[in-house]
């Protein structure tokens, strides 16, 4: 509908990809350089194993998990087709291990439910978001987990929550860790936006602290946003077992499951990421590009947050998304009257805005916002 709209001032805050100040989703410079090298140097396209490019997964572990977790022999990792593939492989492993229930927050990324259900798991939802205040209601979260039982899995967004833009504070990560330990709950951490919230290490800090404290956990990772590799489908799954010995059959099972799901993951994007992480100059360039993407998002967040009192929480949230406190009717009015496009849920992609469009965006929104 946005594409077909002839109005020149139209705004698309719907599609969930990073956009720069010209509205484009460009290939990152470090990615282009690594792809050029790959094209020149790659000697074969023969099959890899079901684990994909292990060099990619190992180097990415340094970025995602940091030391010493990246070299902890209780943790085993494989490359997957995107974060979606990582979540699906996690779901299949959990089903195979006898798990029944996966708890997801309401609202969450709409694909979480189908991914777990298709693997035969039962999805239960917990509260965590105070819609009126646009912030985490941690007490409600803890309350609704009272029903979770030993061995249940709880999905957590590692940072930059999709769709609410929320993130747990370090204290909340600690409280969750204690709760999970006391109740025997297993965290499945979905880290799809590392580096787009506060920074690479900051965005992973809560997850790392939790992994260091709990016996078992899973991490589903996507490189699609922080390397802007979307369609190349680049991701990884790490599973932390209670002991190094327990990690061995887990890895074997992951490989058996991956074989029947996709045989092996696509190579090009992961090989590109490996080349970047292997080369100090390319890695520095990637980090600098990611930092400027993150700064642009946070600049837009500050400006949008300052534009109306009801939008103030957006300034303190993270990542690409925010959930506007408006209803479906307001979403269609914004579309018809102002050529502003977003899904019916009121989720916006902050990077779809420009500093120059924030004032008119906020003015259009204003009549629909709570006073
Ligand atoms: N988890 C969340 C929270 C996401 O928002 C997304 C992508 N929109 C994914 C996982 C899946 O990422 P990928 O595109 O790598 O499959």
Image (cartoon, rainbow, N blue to C red):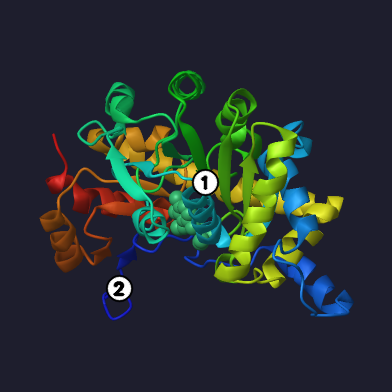
Residue 244 relative to residue 298: left or right: right
Quadrant assignment for the C terminus = top left
Q: Going 81% across and 61% down the picture, which residue do you hit?
A: 275
Q: Going 68% across and 51% down the picture, which residue do you hit?
A: 251
From the viewer's side, name the closer residue of 180 and 169: 180
Residue 199: image quadrant is top right
What x and y, as percent, mark residue 78? 68, 55
What x and y, as percent, mark residue 163? 36, 48
Q: Nearer the viewer, mark 1 or mark 2?
A: 1
Q: Is residue 23 above or below residue 132?
A: below
Residue pointed to by mark 2: 2
Residue pointed to by mark 1: 97
| Spatial separation of the CA atoms under disc 1 and disc 2 | 45 Å
Q: Is residue 251 in view?
A: yes
Q: Is residue 273 above or below residue 362?
A: below
What x and y, as percent, mark residue 11? 32, 64
Quadrant assignment for the N terminus = bottom left
What x and y, as percent, mark residue 155? 43, 41
Mark before the other along the chain sequence, 1 or 2: 2
**Crowdedness near tag 1: few (<14), some (14–19) or many (≥20) residues, C-alpha within 10 Å:** few
Q: Is residue 18 in view?
A: no
């Amino acid at each position: 509908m946005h594409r077909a709209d002839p109005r020149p001032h139209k705004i698309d805050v719907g599609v969930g990809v990073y956009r720069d100040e010209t509205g484009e989703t460009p290939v990152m410079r470090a990615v282009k350089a690594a792809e050029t090298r790959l094209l020149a140097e790659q000697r074969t396209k023969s099959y890899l194993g079901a684990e994909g490019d292990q060099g990619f997964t190992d180097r990415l572990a340094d970025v995602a998990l940091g030391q010493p977790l990246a070299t902890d022999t209780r943790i085993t990792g494989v490359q997957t087709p995107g974060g979606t593939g990582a979540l699906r492989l996690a779901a299949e492993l959990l089903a195979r291990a006898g798990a029944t229930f996966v708890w997801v927050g309401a609202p969450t990324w709409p694909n979480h439910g189908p991914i777990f259900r298709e693997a035969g798991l039962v999805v239960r939802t917990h509260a965590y978001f105070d819609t009126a205040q646009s912030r985490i209601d941690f007490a409600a979260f803890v309350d609704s987990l009272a029903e979770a039982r030993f061995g249940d899995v709880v999905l957590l967004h590692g940072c930059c929550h999709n769709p609410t833009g929320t993130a747990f504070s370090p204290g909340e990560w600690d409280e969750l860790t204690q709760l999970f330990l006391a109740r025997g709950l297993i965290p499945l951490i979905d880290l799809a936006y590392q580096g787009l919230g506060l920074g690479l290490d900051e965005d992973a800090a809560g997850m790392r602290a939790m992994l260091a404290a709990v016996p078992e956990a899973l991490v589903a990772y996507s490189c699609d946003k922080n390397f802007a590799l979307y369609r190349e489908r680049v991701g990884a799954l790490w599973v932390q077992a209670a002991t190094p010995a327990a990690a061995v059959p887990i890895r074997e099972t992951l490989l058996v499951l991956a074989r029947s799901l996709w045989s092996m993951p696509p190579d090009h994007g992961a090989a590109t990421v490996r080349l970047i992480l292997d080369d100090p100059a390319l890695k520095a360039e990637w980090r600098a590009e990611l930092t400027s993407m993150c700064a642009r998002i946070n600049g837009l967040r500050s400006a949008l947050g300052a534009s109306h009192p009801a939008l103030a929480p957006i300034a303190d949230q993270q990542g690409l998304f925010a959930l506007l406190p408006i209803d479906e009717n307001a979403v269609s009015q914004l579309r018809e009257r102002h050529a502003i496009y977003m899904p019916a849920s009121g989720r916006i992609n902050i990077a779809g805005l420009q500093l120059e469009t924030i004032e008119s965006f906020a003015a259009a929104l204003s009549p629909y916002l709570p006073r």
